Amino acid sequence: MKRALTIFAILLASLALSAQVFAAPLKIGVFIPGIREGSPTYDGLAKGAERFAAENPGSSVKVFEAGFNQAEWEEKLISLTAEGKYDFILTSNPSMPDLVNKVSVLFPKQKFICLDGQFAGNPNMYTVLYNQIEQGFITGYLAGLVSTSSMPGANNAKKAGMLIGQHYPVMDKLIIPGFEKGLKAVDPSFQLDVRVLGNWYDATKALELTKSMYDSGSDVVLPIAGSASQGSVKAAQDSGKYLVFFDADEYSRAPKNIVGCTALNQERLAYTVLRDAAAGTLPFGKADVVGIKEGYVEFLDRSPVYLALLPAAIRSKMDMKIQEIKSGKLTFPIPQL
């Protein structure tokens, strides 16, 4: 009996210690390499941190927006880290892990968490990359189904478009190839027209480039161009053509033109990694990958807009393809970035 009580006391102490680790007030720095407004990815990053802080009394969050000039990001990250105030610095961008790895040499006690990026081996950094080949594939598959359908605005050209803010490894090695694989899964003869905006904010130029793609035969376009995507929305509305979107629920922006959205559950991922970091279970030094199977990449097929706009035959094919990915029948390994 005495031995049982002792074991019970040890278990209680262990539970209390775990609770104390999780509940300890934390100071979290959120480094946004851009601006929060108009960016679902960065807004989700900040919201996840804010949710964690709200649920853990005494914890606090400072959101730092570094702006669009990438040449300034390193200096600004150094400045934020040098404050020495944060238990964890949370950021998100495919280019940030390399930058963090460089900066962490100057601050060997600082812990960094990078979402939407990949880097293994730094004991003070944890990264988790979204499987954006999957995201691109399922979005491209929908674009192909719409393009080859009898929906108003679709044509027989078997051509789709992408408007991107700029080239970078994740875009070139994951997103574009994934989108093209999705198109060709519908019909191998599909062609992909990729246009580069050169920034993430010029909506006027985005309108011109998107209209040019429509005029050249594309009937569905995927814009990945930050706040400039508003120009693509206007072009779709003016042309009676279609858009598919990445990263967030964008249906309400143009309910007659946006046929699908494949979102990243950035807010939930940010909250989860901070919870695990606070509990001492986040594997710093490791690089993880999450996708549709884990629930962090999600095709938003329950939207009333999607259900009303897309024919049942297309929705059924989308359901089957998503289930193939979830079951592991269809896989998309991540190449070295």
Image: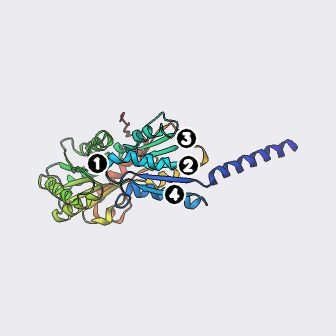
The reply to whether dot 1 and dot 3 touch (C-beta < 8 Å) is: no
Residue 15 image point, x, y percent: 70, 49
Amino acid type of disc 4? Val
Q: Which of 96 and 245 lies nearest the eye of the viewer? A: 96
Where residue 239 appears, as percent x and y from the top left, is 16, 62
Q: Are marks 4 and 2 in contact (CB under 8 Å)?
A: no
**Label 3: which secondary element:** loop
Which mark lies nearer to you, 3 or 4?
A: 3
Q: Disc 1 on helix, strand or loop?
A: helix
Residue in front for this viewpoint, 265 or 321: 265
Query: Dot 2 lies on which element?
Result: loop
Residue found 31% across the figure and 57% down from its top: 260
* Amino acid found under the numbered disc labelled 1: Tyr
Residue at which label 3 appears: 109
Q: CA distance from mark 4 to mark 2?
A: 11 Å
Percent coordinates x, y for residue 140 in the rendering: 28, 48
Earlier-in-chain disc, 2 versus 1 = 2
- Report how far apart the C-alphas of labels 3 and 4 lie in the structure: 19 Å
